[in-house]
Image (cartoon, rainbow, N blue to C red):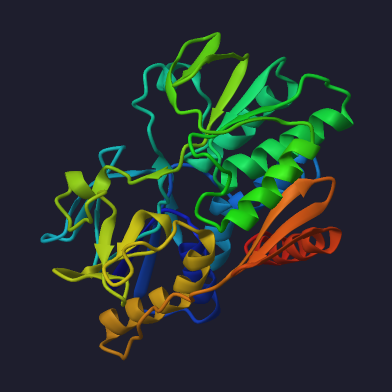
């Protein structure tokens, strides 16, 4: 019996579980380790923030999915891996042997070492923390979102929309260390989304790098901002698992894989999604779009490794569609240098997201 160990229930691993259900291998045992019974889909966090979706609509019941598909699931997180002996140690003390292991555990939140952040800021990674954090923000007397990337901007807009609908007058504050929102996009895109944010009534503060925080104020390089509840969305950070396990990593400690999504020195080790770095594409953004595209390649190459079949290479697309929900069922669509803000963009996002998650729900 061959043993495949899936660590984490991210986009790519959900795909593998469904593929295994549709064409199970009688001599293949698939085990999934995930620290929560529920895997939340971050693409629908914005709609949930505004109140468009209920909690059960944005999550996958991993226990139920595993039962339906014949996958063994354990509510565990891996803390160490011995890639030579092919053994993974979990936080419960359990040892899991494997013939092939794949990691799809996402990333953590960056810059949490800033003084006071760990004690006072809300965070949503791992993503099963999101519902509890959101409930506090929705009713907060003075909420602040820290982070001017896609996640921070989108959550701030939908949080503001929720509060306006419920006549909560105190506006959301959005702090960004960059001098413009969505700094990875063009200046024209940044200018457009900044207008949308300001029109929504959000108090936008650019070029404000947080230096520390306490239970009452967020301190930046220029001033102090009073707040009641703060959400910290200051970019991604690599999990410590790979460095501690002495697996090959890039200079930021993400698992380093080849275009086959395998670790070069340990071909039984695979990875996908935000926890990896591709050797040939080191600057690739941590984006769920790539995890979805990696999924079929990952499954084919795992089978190729286990059964000595042909595999294939993952080549990321240079342009991809991205839609941010801006509240009130409008979406900000970006594709290359093209961008627009319209209601049908939100409808397209809703259709894509709903179709994706429905595949894994009962």
> Residue 93's spot in the image, x, y percent?
25, 39
Q: Position of residue 197 (x, y in %)?
A: 72, 40
Q: Quadrant of the C terminus?
A: bottom right
User: In the orientation shown, which residue stands out farthest toward the bottom?
Assistant: 310
Name the image quarter holding residue 203.
top right
Q: Position of residue 9 (x, y in %)?
A: 47, 55
Q: Is residue 173 visible?
A: yes
Q: Quadrant of the N terminus?
A: bottom left
For this view, does 191 lie left or right of residue 128? right
- Please, is residue 50 above or below residue 270 in the view? above
Residue furthest left as drawn: 84
Q: On screen, 329 above or below 338?
A: above
Does any portion of residue 70 appear in the rendered image? Answer: no
Q: Can you tell which quarter of the image residue 168 is in?
A: top right
* Residue drawn at the location 53% of the way across and 36% of the way down: 147
> In this orientation, which residue lies closer to the viewer: 67 or 192?
192
Left or right of 184 on screen, residue 267:
left
Query: Left or right: where does residue 143 sit relative to residue 233?
Result: right
Instruction: Pick the residue in front: 352 or 105.
Output: 352
Q: Is residue 122 left or right of residue 87?
A: right
């Amino acid at each position: 019996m061959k043993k495949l160990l899936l660590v984490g229930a991210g986009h790519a691993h959900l795909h593998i579980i469904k593929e295994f259900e549709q064409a199970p291998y009688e001599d293949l045992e698939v085990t999934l380790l995930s620290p929560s019974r529920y895997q939340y889909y971050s693409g629908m966090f914005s709609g949930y923030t505004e109140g468009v979706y209920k909690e059960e609509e944005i999550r996958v019941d991993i226990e139920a999915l595993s039962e339906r598909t014949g996958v063994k699931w354990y509510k565990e997180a891996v803390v160490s891996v011995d890639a030579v002996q092919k053994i993974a140690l979990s936080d419960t003390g359990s040892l899991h042997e494997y013939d092939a292991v794949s990691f799809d555990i996402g990333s953590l939140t960056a810059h949490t070492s800033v003084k006071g952040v760990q004690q006072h800021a809300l965070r949503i990674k791992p993503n099963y923390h999101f519902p509890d954090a959101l409930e506090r923000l929705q009713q907060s007397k003075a909420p602040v979102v820290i982070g001017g990337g896609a996640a921070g901007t989108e959550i701030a807009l939908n949080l503001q929309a929720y509060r306006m609908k419920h006549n909560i007058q105190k506006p959301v504050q959005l702090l960004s260390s960059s001098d413009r929102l969505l700094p990875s996009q063009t200046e024209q895109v940044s200018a457009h989304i900044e207008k949308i944010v300001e029109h929504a009534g959000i108090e936008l503060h650019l070029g404000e790098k947080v230096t520390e925080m306490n239970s009452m104020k967020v301190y930046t390089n220029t001033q102090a901002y009073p707040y009641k509840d703060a959400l910290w969305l200051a970019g991604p950070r690599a999990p410590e698992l790979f460095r501690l396990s002495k697996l090959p990593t890039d200079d930021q400690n993400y698992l380093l894989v080849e275009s086959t999504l395998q670790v070069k020195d340990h071909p039984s080790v695979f990875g996908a999604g935000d926890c990896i770095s591709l050797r040939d594409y080191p600057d690739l953004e941590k984006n769920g779009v790539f995890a979805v595209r990696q999924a079929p390649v990952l499954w084919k190459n795992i089978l190729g490794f286990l059964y000595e079949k042909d595999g294939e290479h993952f080549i990321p697309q240079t342009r991809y569609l991205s839609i941010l929900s801006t509240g009130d069922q409008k979406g900000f669509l970006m594709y290359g240098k093209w961008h627009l803000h319209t209601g049908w963009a939100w409808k397209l996002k809703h259709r894509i997201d709903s179709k994706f998650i429905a595949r894994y729900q009962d």
